[in-house]
Image (tube, rainbow, N blue to C red):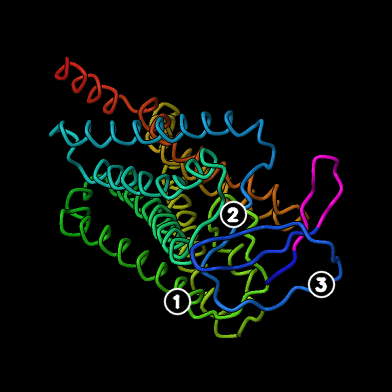
Amino acid sequence: MRVMTKENETGSRYPLTCFFIPNTLFFFKSCPRSTEPQNLTRVPEFLLLGLSDDREWQPVLFELFLTMYLVSMLGNLLIILALGSDPHLHTPMYFFLCNLSLADLGFTSTMITMIVDIRTHSGVISYRGCLTQMSFFMFFGCLDSLLLAVTAYDWLVAICHPLQYMAIMNTHLCGLLVLASFFTSLLVSQMHNSIVSQLTYFKDVEIAHFFCEPSQLLKLPSSNTSTNNIVMYLVRAISGFFPISGILFSYYKIVSSILRVPSAGGKHKAFSTCGSHLSVVCLFYGTGLGVYLSSAVSLSTRNDAVDSVVYTVVTPMLNPFIYSLRNMDIKAAMWKLFSKSV
């Protein structure tokens, strides 16, 4: 049993006594206010606090996020179908782009529980369901990060070594890079999952987010070990530090090569070719870094959840538009796809 407080309509706070019964979660008002939080053994369910407690906003949030989810799914599916239907686009660059779209599809789909919770007015998620959602979130998020680094390397070879491009970026290497990204993301996901699955004591069951966000979930245990900290640093290095370092190095070499081009027109053409990828990189890592910095400064965990909407929902939705609007080949492939369907 755990006593928590919640604000009522007048803004005052009253305690909520939470009885944990397998597969259900009941809240009852109670009079005592001095009960201290107790360590809870592994609980069957967690409570996602979501984005807002205001019931009047729930229909608006439901329609907004459902629309964003459908647009994201449709945009990424169109890119995958367009690239697959045009033989002229079966090149390493578009092969990596297709895999990026697949990763975005999976990444966005992990947020579907938020839409369901808004619709049903229920934030309860089972322990196993929480671990599963966190695992998929870590997997697709890390896969997105690694594929962006792989795509940056592809641009490096295309701009710095154009004559040897097809020889270097052969089918074997492209497949190996994608498989390495896949299995590395799977390893990161399972490493993170193993940390949480070994925890047996929690000091709270409320997750101040709209999904089982890993950093919020790791705040719930009543104790933390040095082994868990080491594994977490390793996870962050693999999924964040190494991909970002690879991207920065690739663009350092790309910029250095472009600056050696004598004509201004040649420089502009070279910069414009990798503009889409650079825009997606800035959007992906920029929003993620912004959420991290805001969470370090802000005292409100609810604000952190609102900020997280940007990189979990908005970014995967915008990626197809960035690639299609700045790429004439993809525009032509989509036009052919629409013409065939009509």
Residue toward you, 259 or 251: 251
Residue flagged by tag 1: what amino acid is it?
Ser
Image depth: mark 2 or mark 1 in front: 2
Residue 223 in picture, x, y percent from top left: 65, 81
Q: Which residue is mark 1?
A: 194
Along the horizontal axis of the image, is 329 left or right of 127? left
Say whether residue 252 is magenta: no
- How much space separates mark 2 and mark 1, taking CA atoms? 21 Å
Q: Which residue is mark 2?
A: 48
Quadrant in which the N terminus is drawn: bottom right
Which mark is nearer the camera, 2 or 3? 3
At label 2, counting other C-alpha atoms closer than 10 Å, the crowd grade (few under 14, some 14-19, many 20 or more) is: many
Between marks 3 and 1 in the image, the one whose residue lies nearer the viewer: 3
Closer to us: 198 or 79: 198
The magenta stretch spans which residues?
4-14
> Between disc 2 and disc 3, whose residue precedes?
3
* Crowdedness near tag 3: few (<14), some (14–19) or many (≥20) residues, C-alpha within 10 Å: few
Image location of residue 316, percent across then percent down: 44, 40
Q: The residue under label 3 is which amino acid type?
A: Thr
With respect to residue 85, does 187 lie above or below?
below
| Quadrant of res 35 | bottom right
How far is mark 3 from mark 1, CA to CA? 32 Å
Q: Residue at x 64, y 70 (%)?
A: 220
Q: Give the x, y percent position of residue 209.
A: 61, 53
Q: Is residue 141 above or below residue 91?
A: below
Residue at numbered disc 3: 35
